[in-house]
Structure formats: structure tokens, C-alpha cells
Image (tube, coloured by chain):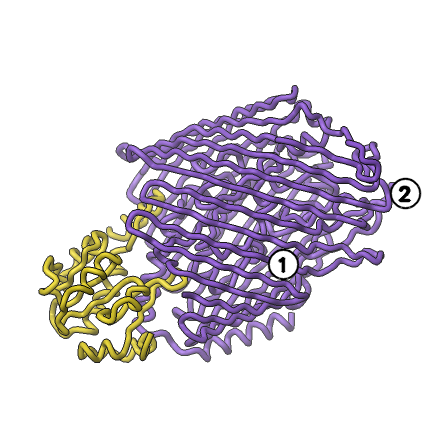
Amino acid sequence: MKKLIIILLLLYGQAYALEVRSTLKLYHHLFSSMSSKKSVNVYVEDVEYANIFVKSKYINLVSDVDKADFILVTTDKMLMKLNTKHMSNDTIIITNKYSHMTQSDKIVGAFYYRKGRKQFLFVKPRLEEHNVTLPSMYKKYIVDEL
Amino acid sequence: MSFVKWYLFMVVVLVQGFAQASELDDLINDFNNKNALSKKTIDENKGHLVLYSRDKLERMHAKTLKDVFKTTPVLYYHENRYAQPDPLTSGAFEPYRSNFIRMYIDGVEVTQGWMGSGIVLYGDINIDFVDHIEFYYMTPSFETTTEPAYLTIFLYSKEAERDSGGAVSLATGSRGTNTQTVSYGDKKEAFSYMVNLSHTDAKREKIPNGTSRPLSRDFERTQLFSYIKSENQTFHLQVLKKNMDSLAGLSLDATPLVSEIDYLNLHVDYSITFWEHWKAQFAYEYLDSEIRQEDDNPFSFGSTFLGKKLYTKGKNSTVNTELTYKNTLGNHRITTGVKYRMKGIDSYETIDTSTETNIAVIPLNFDNESIVSLFFQDQYRLKENQLLTLGLEYNNITRNGGVSDDELFQVRLGYLYSGEKWSYKTYLYRSMFALEPFGRYLHLEFTNSVKPQVTRGITQEIAYKSENAYTRLTALYMQDKNGLLENNHAGDTKYFFGIFNYNYRFDVNNMMDLQLYYAHYKDIGNLNKLEDYSGYVSFSNSYENWSIYNGVVWHQNSIDNKNYFDLTSSISWEASRNLTFTLKGDNLLNKAKTTKLFRIDPLTGGNLKPFDISPIDQLIMLEVEYRF
């Protein structure tokens, strides 16, 4: 039924943003690779991401940054806010914009657009700081420095 | 054939040699495919689509629209005797012929107004600013078009959110050809913007013509594309300046002493969506052209001799306004609207510079053509996966200067089925085409009534999608009455096309595209029958920081049964996240399809042997791209 709805959306030529299933699959893979918890607490301000994450049984959306296992930064404003706040090492911050990685050492990794395609990027020392060891399939997305 | 076997063998070896993609790569690839920008813009109801996604354009290392256009079926990239992109050219002395092809950037038509289709200037533009390209065959959705077309080309620009930051690329290659491109874009909270500036100095292959001055088609082009967008408003500014050597130009025997054309084009448009269902759009286009032609024999216009040195200067402008309304009412999705287009020639003069006399061959009182279009479309949902579509359009064309007016009426009926694996669509249509104003302007006899062309057709498409493969068969049958393009036979032109596509993904890094095309024409040009065949096969492979593309376009037709091959290969190396080197070769076998350029002996009026000229130069380019 879900597929049919997607097909009909295409037929009608209506614009939509992120596709739910592939987005959830990818973030599930990422979060479960970084955390051994059965479910994870995620803080996100972006309405579009929130609407997708709320459909997941694995992801719990939280409204308090301090209760989050993961924070997804999507705007410069959100980044500035986090930069002024003391964050625990247990909270992992990721972003969807490459420039955020260069602007803040607090950000561990990015799932960002490069040449119109999304790809991962992680900085090794920042992963180590948070005691995160990613599976080997992430190896090619890890750099020593930016 | 031995080359094709060798080529296929090499590709199979390459594919097998590459490592398998990981589960994570598959997830990322799935995400990218399902969230591609093209998913937002594709409208299946526009017609039969050939899509060049961002991923495919990147893999092809396509840098100009010509790189893409040369691989499309039905209408291929060709250039006329002025070296202008003109896929429907016959190579004879004729006004611009490709006005049945219309081009859009971000949904707004780029028209050269009095000259006709935007293809004349934009047919080979630098596509660095483009995210993806959609080619729709046959009569398109009336929602998008003001004037009828056989083929509509939609270029969609990169989104600032997905391509934020800057990029600089420098390329140099054969004969000193060089290109520089700079772009920058960003998304702010309330708006996003992008600016893309490019400069190309193209040193193209010369065509020997038996004189000390071989035919030249070099050009220098500076191109600006920019936009600023908010949630419901968009503003575009495009400027294109092209100074070109215009091949044979007006020279009857293709031995010009001087043949040059300079163009300056400005395009601005603004659109706003409001009250949820309404959209208003305004576009303005300006084209300034200067033509310099010199020959050792006098140029002629019909039976009038014009002198040996001509200078023509023309300015024209086009204004487009649109108001559309879209709403879903039960199972009906209604789109209706009104469009107004005004094409004006602001000035046009031709001077014989040897005598400094103004040559009065133009009916100067004809300088304006206006088109009012009303359309209505309904997409009725029969079932969850089936649509019935109906489109009606009325065009009222008025011309001043005593030139006759036209009324056109277009009808389009379609049925679409889309299942999980199978999809099917069919259209029935009746379209009408009017002669472009420039054609009338240059031929006094056409200022009187010229019957609009009526084209009737039926098209069908069936496709099957599996996990790694996509197979599609498209068939079209059309018939023209009162054909506007030259037809020396009494019968109406009839044509049948069949296109077969097969795309296979070996894994996330290795893909193959295959396309076969057959066309059968009856009563076209000077021919009772014409059969046209073509094929396109390409392989794109990537391994770690390397990506390789190989594509061959094959052509043959029943005129000479000669085989033409255009091999394009490229290899790209990402030295770092910011720096990429690409080496690319076009027409590597130097056997790409050619176009006839007809010649007349100016002294006897007899026909000389035509030149065979390929619009695709043999070209090797090295490019360095830096992103920041």
C-alpha cells in the first residue's frame, strides 16, 4: 500500500522532500552502528526529520537536548545554540551540512550532500573522544582531520 | 564490429574486476535514488520521459547540453549551416527549423522570441548549473507549454541546499579549447540562492572548403545563471553572450570571407504561488544579434542580389505571463490557466557595408506576434494506480502588419497505469503548429495565410522494473497534415518510432544503459521513405576514488546505410574530498554522425557536392575541479 501511495504521488507530480523508508533505514543503520541501546533518544528541531523519526519504533524523539543520545543539527542557528552549551560525551552530534563540521569540533559526523548525492563523513579523533567505533563498512567515510 | 566486441570485452573485465559494494553503500544509494531532485519534478503526465538524473550526468561527465543531446533518441543533436544547434536542420538554405523543440529552465521556457525556440542559443550550453534533465517526447502537458512542441527539454538547476558552497573548475583541451566555471550557492533560513558563471573559448575542428579560409565554427561564450528562491517565490536571472564563427553562413558555395554572428541574451523571470492553488509567472527575454557576412560573390535573397558585404543588426524581446490554478477535487486533479506571450521585433536592419546602403527586403510593418492560450487539464483517478487524463488548449495568435492570424486547438487524451513492477501509458492527441514569425519575416510570400500544421498521433509505452533492471518499450505513430517543414511530396508525412531501453545495475558502482531506436518515415523532405536506426550503450564504473565512463552512440539510415560511431570515454580521480581531475574524450573514433551542408554554385546556380560535417568534434579535455 505504501508503494502505491508513493507511485500515485509521482503520477500526480507533487513535490515531496525526504522519502520516509530510505531515510529511516539509513538513520537506523547509523544510530545502531554508534550505539548498542535497544532504542535511542534523538533531538532534532527540523520538522521534516521529526515527522519521519516519529514513525520509527527504534527512535524516541526528545525535546530536551540533555536527554538525547543523538542530536541532528540541520541549521546554522541550531549549531550556534549548541556551541554555547556544554555537552556530555555521551551525546553524539551529527549534522546534515558539511560546513557545520568545519565550524564546530563538537560535531562527530555528517550525512551531507556532495555533488547532489548524500554521503557520510566522520572525523576519527572526534569519534575516539566519544568512544565510538564504527563498523568497518564505514571506514572509507572516516578521515583523520578535515 | 571488431571494435564493438573489444569494447564490450573490456567493460565486462572492468566490471568483474571491481569490488562489490557494501550493505551501507546500498543503503546510501537507495536513499540517493529515492530522494533525487528529479523525483520532485518528474510529471509522468507530461509525456514519454527520457531522464538524465544528477547521478547519470555526473557519471557521464556531461559538461554541455550537447553531451546529453547527442545520446537521445528520435531527435539528435545537429547544427545548421550557421553552426547553431538545430536538430531538425536539413543543411539547406532555410530558416531555423527546430522550433518544434522547446526548452525550459526550472519550468520557465527559454524562448528567443522572434527567432523561435530557445534551442538556437541554449542547445549546447554549459550545464554546470543543472541538477537533472528531462526530455519529454510528443505533445507535452499544456500546463507547461504556451506553444505546441514535439519535444520539450526541461533543465532543472541544482538546489542550494544540496550544492551549498562553491566550486571552481578549469578545463583545457584539443586545439586550445578552454572552459572556466565558478559557482556558489547557499541556503539561508528564509531563502536560498545560487550563482553560476562560466566562460568557454571553443576552438572547434575546421572544415576544409577548397579555399585558404576553411569553414570555422569557433565560439566564445560567457554564461551567467542565477536564482534566488523563497518558499513560494522564485527569481531567475540569466545572461548569455556568444560570439561565434557561423560556418558557411549565407555563402551559397560555403566559401565565405567573413561569417560571424554575435548574440547577447538576457532572461529574467519571477513566479509566486499564492492562496494555496494559484501560481503567477512573469518572464522577459531580450536578444540582440549582429550578423557579419562577406563573400566573393553577391549574396542573394530569392531572386534579389544583396551585395558582397552584409551587416545585419536585430533586437527582439519576448514577454510571457501565466496564471494557473491547480486543485484536487475528489478523484479529479484539475489544472487550468491562461497564458499570454508577446514576441516583438524591436529593430532589424541589413546594410550592404560595401556601399553603406540599407537593404529594404523586410516588411517592417510586421513586428509583433501575440499568443493568448487557454488550457484545461483533468487527471481523473480511475483506481489507486490508474489515471485518465484529458487536456484541451486553445491558442489565439494575432500578428500586426496585415499578416494573417491563426487559431489553434489542441487535444490530448491519456491513460496511465503504474504498478509495483509494470507500468503502461498511452496518449492520443491532435496538435496544431503555426509558422514562426521569423520564417514569415524572411519570406514575403509567407506573410499571407500559411495553414497551420495538424499532427495526429498515438503513443504507447510499457515498462518493467525489477531490483536491478529497468526495461521499457515506447512506440509512436504520427501523421502531419499541411507540414510546415519542407515536404516535396504530395502525401502527408507519416512516421513511426520505436524505442527500446534497458538499464542494468550490476551493483551500486557499476551500471549499463542500452537504447535502441528505429524510425520509419513516409513522404519526408525529398524522400518517399526513410528508415533511421540508432543505438546507445554506456557503462559507468567506479572503484574507490576512480570513476570511468564509456559510451557509444551508433547511427545509420537508409539514405546511405553508412554506420556512424561516437565513442565518449572519461576517467575521473578524486584526489581529495575537494579536488577532482577528469580526463574526457569525445568522438574518439572520429566517426560521429554527420550533417549535410548543401552548396550552390553562385555562377551557374547548379548544385555542388555537399559537405558532410559532424556537429561532434573530436575533443580531449582535462578538467580540474575544486570545491569549497
Dividing the picture into quarters, in which one does residue B444 lie? top right
Q: Is residue B12 left or right of residue B292?
A: left
Residue B98, image x and y in percent? 61, 42
Q: Quadrant of the C terminus of chain B?
A: bottom left
Q: Which mark is residue A74?
A: none
B22 left or right of B495 in image? left
> Horizontal placement of B299 versus B197: left or right?
right
Residue shown at 76% from the left, 54% from the top: B215
Q: Nearer the viewer, residue B232 or B441?
A: B232
Which chain, by letter, is purple?
B
Which element is circle 2 on?
loop
Q: Which mark is residue B201?
A: 1
Distance from disc 1 to disc 2, alpha carbons, whole Å, reads: 37 Å
Same chain, labels 1 and 2? yes
Callout 1: chain: B
> The N terminus of chain B is located in which quarter?
bottom right
Residue type at mark 2: give it.
Leu
Q: Position of residue B549 (x, y in %)?
A: 52, 68
Instruction: Give the residue at mark 2.
Output: B603
In what element is the residue under mark 1?
strand
Chain at tag 2: B
Q: Earlier in the sequence, mark 1 or mark 2?
A: 1
User: Chain drawn yellow, letter?
Assistant: A
Say if residue B332 shows up in the picture: no
Q: Between tags 1 and 2, which lies in front?
A: 1
Q: Nearer the viewer, residue B570 or B458?
A: B570
A40 to B575, vertically: above or below:
above
- Residue B36 visible in the current orientation: yes
In the image, farthest residue toward the top:
B402
